[in-house]
Amino acid sequence: MKKTDLAKSDAKKLMGKMNVPGAGAFGKEAVVVDRREQRKRDQALGLVPFAVKLNSDLVLQLQTLAKERGADLNELVAEVLVKGLAAA
């Protein structure tokens, strides 16, 4: 193997390590959860993925309300839906 081939191989290894999730944590140990494991956790909690398309103004209102309350966006949307369905 030539010296240049070895350098290219080392560079490819380094670039591969940089593309790993959590590599941009800048000295902090980032907890990377596997998607499959996260899906199992969500299923154990009874959570189901539910995608909808909303108006951008409505999404902005939900995001600001979640920031004000310090809550997760998923929890806030669930709360708003429960209140709205109870009123209907």
Image: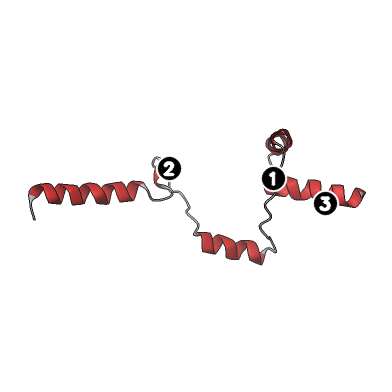
Q: Which residue is mark 2?
A: 25
* Residue at 60% across, 63% down: 41
The answer to whether marks 1 and 2 mark residues whose Cβ atoms lie closer than 8 Å is no
| Residue nearest the viewer, comparing 8 with 26 | 8
Does 43 sit left or right of 33 as displayed? right
Please state which amino acid type lies under the numbered disc 3. Val
Q: Is residue 59 left or right of residue 30?
A: right
| Percent x, y of residue 24 | 41, 42
x, y (%) of residue 43? 64, 65
Gap in angstroms between the C-alphas marked 3 and 1: 19 Å
Q: Secondary structure at mark 3?
A: helix
The CA distance from mark 2 to mark 3 is 36 Å
Q: Which residue is mark 1?
A: 53
Q: Residue at x 34, y 46 (%)?
A: 18
Relative to 68, residue 3 above or below: below
**Disc 1 residue crowd, few under 14, some 14–19, many 20+, Cα 10 Å:** few
The kind of residue tagged 2 is Ala
Badge 3 is on which residue? 82
Name the image colouring: secondary structure
Rendering quarter of residue 44? bottom right
Q: Is residue 16 above or below residue 57?
A: below
| Residue 87 point in image, percent of width and height | 92, 48
Amino acid type, label 1: Lys
Q: Is residue 10 above or below residue 67?
A: below
Q: Earlier in the sequence, mark 1 or mark 2?
A: 2
Relative to the observer, which residue lies in front, 14 or 27?
14
Q: Disc 1 or disc 2, which is closer to the eye? A: 1
Say which quadrant the N terminus sits in: bottom left
Measuring from the top left, give residue 40's x and y in whole percent: 59, 66
Question: Decide: marks 3, 1 in contact (CB < 8 A)?
Answer: no
